[in-house]
Amino acid sequence: MRDIIETERLTLRQTKLRDAAAFSKLVSDFDIARMTGSIAYPYPLLSAEFKIMTFHAAKRRGLAHPYAITLTDEDEMIGVADLFKRSADELWEIGYWIGQAFWGNGFMTEACRALLAEANATMGAEDRIAGVFTDNPGSARVLEKLGFEKSGKPDEYFSTARLSNAESQDFILRARA
């Protein structure tokens, strides 16, 4: 996978430790943190630095391709899109979030479409998976626009920010044969 992926309005680039301040600020919004499984609330700078280091470690191990999302011609992170595996024998999963000030502009669909196209071009077309909390219809719409379909029935998944389980829906994007 390339280190930089460009779209019409966005640049997806490797995460850097200097992104930690923006990362911390953006996900310290409870409306963002609660829609993820692994982001606590609030999210201090040290946690963001650690998360970026874990992104890098997973990338080195071949288990993740995390990207900072930036607006074209700007370098400040506005979100993250990550293609990752929970273990070596599982399907690649897409995960993402974007700062609330950037919601409703189609940025996440654009970023994820580019990330999936890059994955297909460099790693081959394979099934991809994702999951969203059912009280996050915006994220479900992103997946549907990308061609994902619901798989199975809703189930419970832990949200660190909520400190509890919440109903979650799995999705799958079938590789085109």
Image (cartoon, rainbow, N blue to C red):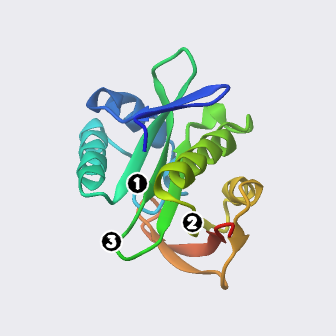
**Residue, x 44% and y 40% (percent of image)?**
67
Contact check, label 1 and label 2, Cβ < 8 Å: no
Q: Quadrant of the N terminus?
A: top left
Q: Could you tell me which secondary element the residue under label 1 belongs to?
A: loop
Q: Look at mark 2 in the image and give the residue it sits on.
A: 130
3 vs 1, front mark: 3
**Residue, x 67% and y 26% (percent of image)?**
8
Instruction: First in sequence, mark 3 or 2: give its number.
Output: 3
Q: Position of residue 73 (x, y in %)?
A: 55, 14
Q: Look at mark 1 in the image and give the residue it sits on.
A: 39
What is the distance, in whole Å, between disc 3 and disc 1 at their CAs?
A: 23 Å
Residue 10 got which mark?
A: none
User: Viewer-proximal residue, 21 or 76?
Assistant: 76
User: Viewer-proximal residue, 73 or 50?
Assistant: 73
State the residue lying farthest toward the front: 177
**Residue, x 66% and y 70% (percent of image)?**
174
Could you tell me the amino acid type at mark 1? Ile
Residue 88 got which mark?
A: 3
